[in-house]
Amino acid sequence: MEARLPSHSLALPHSSHHHRFGGCPSSPSSSSGVLPKMATFTFTVPATTFTPLSSSSSSSSSVSVPFLRPHSSNLPTPRRRRFPSSPNPLNPVFLLHRTNGKRHSTTTTTTTLAVAIDSTDDVSVDQNLNEGKDYKIVLPTNESSERLLRIRHTCAHVMAMAVQKLYPDAKVTIGPWIENGFYYDFDIEPLTDKDLKRIKKEMDRIIGKNLPLVREEVSRDEALRRIMALNEPYKIEILESIKDDIITIYHIGEQWWDLCAGPHVESTGNINKKAVELESVAGAYWRGDERKPMLQRIYGTAWENEEQLKAYLHFKEEAKRRDHRRLGQDLDLFSIQDDAGGGLVFWHPKGAIVRHIIEDLWKKIHMDRGYDLLYTPHVAKADLWKISGHLDFYKENMYDQMSIEDELYQLRPMNCPYHILLYKRKRHSYRDFPIRVAELGTVYRYELSGSLHGLFRVRGFTQDDAHIFCLDDQIKDEIRGVLDLTEEILLQFGFDKYEVNLSTRPEKAVGDDDIWEKATSALKDALNDKGWTYQIDDGGGAFYGPKIDLKIEDALGRKWQCSTIQVDFNLPQRFDITYVDSNSEKRRPILIHRAVLGSLERFFGVLIEHYAGDFPLWLSPIQARILPVTDTQLEYCNDVTNKLKMNGIRAEVCHGERLPKLIRNAEKQKIPLMAVVGAKEVETETVTVRSRFGGELGTMSVDDFITRIKLATQNPTSL
Ligand SMILES: [Zn+2]
Ligand SMILES: [Zn+2]
């Protein structure tokens, strides 16, 4: 069988270049379009056999926006957010709640924010959540469960056997196990979803017969003879690519066999047919080569039991519902314009306001913590990139040079050289340190058009970049400061579960052992000081210095690499930056690159998926929509809207439809608050307020409304 698909990691696609070369942290930014590894996911779905959670996790409660006091109404009941607690930060679980015999699932992955109940889900959540019991299911992975891996391996063969039974002319090729299941490529006429159903039925039959899987070792000649007898041309190619002398084949029962190195389950009966589903079929070129025949690739998912399959399908559906590309369009947040080019992001007004809020918060926190803010250009002379080493080591990610008055210029892929140039603008003494400079710096990096993915993998993006210049013995305190700042920012968005990695010196590295040793223990000390648990990736550091990477966990339990902190012994040398120490001797400062959000584009994508488009009140592009019952109230509505705006509240009027339609539209747009205005409200100078998650709030004066919104947004993390 061919090599497994790469297991997706959130590491930068260009992390390798990154390592080869000293650069700014963050390229996680554009990069990790890929969903996080399943290993980190856990889910629940309605099912009956889950293990009850420990009591600590059964304390989920329904929470509404603070000033919201729902009371009865004949308007449809809005859904509310629930904020369950999670017993184990690094082992998120989906909880299953049972309420009045109905089941609801939600996540426990953040305590400040929970999954908004799907607006298409008609099950309303009542106040009795605490009476429900919580259940959890943790999905195994190929890495964590050898049995699961065997099941998936076997499923690929069972599917191939089924296909050849139903389509005797089909030629088999390869069929590896993959992250959530398996696939197999067939040379066969195009298949439809209906065909998949037939194939699954046949698979069920094979599973039901409990046929043994028997391993047989044969010589290469014998294998070739048997393949020729079956007329399987692709298998000949596969055989040629096997380097071992002994060829193993696996029989399923007596009538079918496949070339394979194993491992498999003992007999097909060990597969639970209710835990297997065929997901899709797509064209795929043999060996991924477009000059070669187009094959049909059938994807299947397979698990140890039915509950796991359900949990996985539930997760998949939830991930689809949260897809930032879809929500970005539905909520009019951003787009990629064909006329402008792939991977170049247009922030629409509603997306731009969210970015503005994030940037403001980011700038304020940085200034509070002693950073100076910078703005630097987007292009520079090619020579600068030669000094920095980018032209030698990062060229494939850079756009072509442009000639300006006979000199070559280049778009920047990183901000670091600019910050270093600014450092060099004057002489520094040891008393100047630490120097912290930060910039929301837009960079451009080449990505294959086929790899572009919404906001997750783009060609132009803005890093929330910063560089710290410091003395050797300041490293620990500076790192600790970055950890605090990182936490402060991430908590604002409800991210309170992190996976932290410390990567140490690789074999090939610049810098003395001494300074590596010193810097690495400074990073460890800072992490210990902070009280964060972390894993050590021995030898996984960049060649230019040790680093800390931090992944945040979203509401679905997926992990996203955002923050990174990297010590750099390379660029200070390349740019020959110095300071004068207390003995009036010239020395080299330490350079630390760091990013908290990674890139604004990517972080926005993560946020959209994390909140499922239901931004909390403080972050919501439109906080309140004012809805007139008839256009007679329009003028008053405009007055109210203006008053809200004067108070810094993002409000808008919507009219021209009947009220129920206006309300439905506001729900669809996930607007947190609606203020309904009829004749009575105009007369009494009030509004009747309803909240998306808090229900009916009743009629109140406009001033009251304003006060309550202000109160509710004062402490963002409480929302
Ligand atoms: Zn940098
Ligand atoms: Zn196999």
Image (cartoon, rainbow, N blue to C red):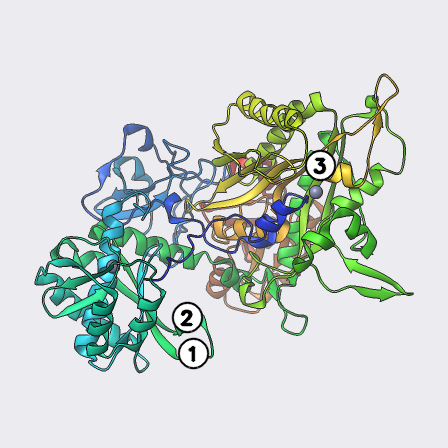
Q: Please, what is the three-letter code of the amino acid marked with disc 2?
A: Arg
Residue drawn at (77%, 41%), measured in percent from left and top? 574
Is residue 55 positioned above or below 330 on the image? above
Please tell me whether mark 2 sits on a helix, a strand or a loop: helix
> Which residue corresponds to mark 1?
292
Q: Is 442 on the left-hand or right-hand side of 562?
A: right
343 or 353: nearer the eye? 343
Q: Is 646 on the left-hand or right-hand side of 126?
A: right
Marks 3 and 2, how far apart in space? 52 Å
The label nearer to you, 3 versus 2, is 2
Dot 1 or dot 2: first in sequence order is 2
Q: Are marks 1 and 2 in contact (CB under 8 Å)?
A: yes
Marks 1 and 2, how far apart in space? 8 Å
Q: Please, what is the three-letter code of the amino acid marked with disc 1?
A: Lys
Q: Which mark is residue 287?
A: 2
248 or 139: nearer the eye? 248
Mark 1 and ligand 2: say if the CB distance to the nearest ligand atom is below 8 Å.
no
Q: Please, what is the three-letter code of the amino acid marked with disc 3?
A: Lys
> Which residue corresponds to mark 3?
364
Please tell me whether mark 1 sits on a helix, a strand or a loop: loop
